[in-house]
Image: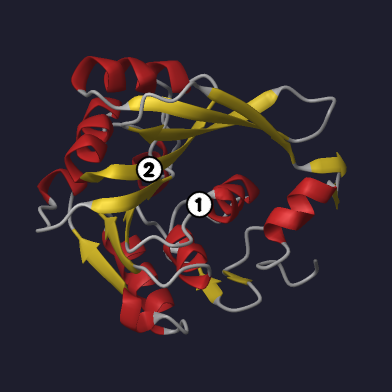
Amino acid sequence: MARNSYFQFKQFRVEQGLTAMKITTDACILGARAEVENRQAILDVGAGTGLLSLMAAQRSTARIDAVELDDQAAIQARENFSASPWQNRLTLHHCPIQSFRPEKRYDCILSNPPFFENAFKAPCDKRSLARHTDSLSFLDLAETIDRLLSEEGKAWILLPVASSPLFLQALHRATRLRLERTIAVRSSDTHKDHRHLLVLGRSECEHELERITIYSEHPVYTAEAMALLRDYYLKL
């Protein structure tokens, strides 16, 4: 996906010139795959441009709270919300998620969090903040989800395959949440899985494994990817 200063979707536009981490196909897969329909209260942890909140707003009638730490990203997300058709249902909170203390819990939590632990940091400080767990450790994220997810709620978390075990260790150590589903994402049939979409909840259901293949041959999307993204992408 080209990293332009904006990305135009069918029903909204995402300006991203101020943010370190640009829109990715993987994030769009998360936004399109998450089950947000019939949800009443959605939380977007580490909102960035506000992409996940906007995608959720398009497919739901929920009220959506988005929390973002970075100053410039918070400005960008707020502007994107204001320019969208759903501005009355979208609220940006500029603060660390650790100090976010709403008076309610959420039946859906979405997050494409910082994911590199103990790795060499990129030269750009803002990009490092967005991509590393220094500002939001996996333990903090797990405890946040446990604190803010309703009893029947589901959390949808996008992580690199190598980071998933580290996050799940923190989840099992600090909470009673369960991994209900793993959706493995790969670029094509000839590539290994590169992302895990983890679905968390409190039920005792048996773990399910799914897979999404994005391209049949780059840049041609598979039928399953087109079905997911068709309501959002202009050219599908």
Q: Which of marks 2 and 1 precedes in the sequence? A: 1
Q: Residues within 10 Å of mark 2 (few under 14, many from 20)?
A: many
Q: Residue 104 occupies which quadrant of the picture?
A: bottom left
Q: Which residue is mark 2?
A: 154
Q: Residue at x 44, y 53 (%)?
A: 20
Q: Position of residue 22 (x, y in %)?
A: 53, 55
Whether residue 83 is visible: yes
Q: Secondary structure at mark 1?
A: loop
Q: Secondary structure at mark 2?
A: strand
Q: CA distance from mark 1 to mark 2?
A: 9 Å
Residue at the (57%, 69%) spot, across then down: 5
Answer with left or right where residue 28 lies relative to residue 93: right
Picture quadrant where residue 71 is located? bottom left
Q: Amino acid at mark 1?
A: Glu
Disc 1 target residue: 35
| Residue 161 drawn at (x, y percent) | 55, 23
Instruction: Identify the image quadrant of the C terminus.
Output: bottom right
Q: Amino acid at mark 2?
A: Lys
Image coordinates of residue 50 in percent, x first then y, are 42, 63
- Would you identify the image quadrant in which residue 209 lies? top right
The residue at 80%/69% (across/down) is 235
Residue 117 visible in the shown view: no
Number of marks in the rendered image: 2
Given contact means CB atoms under 8 Å apart, are the residues at marks 1 and 2 in contact? yes
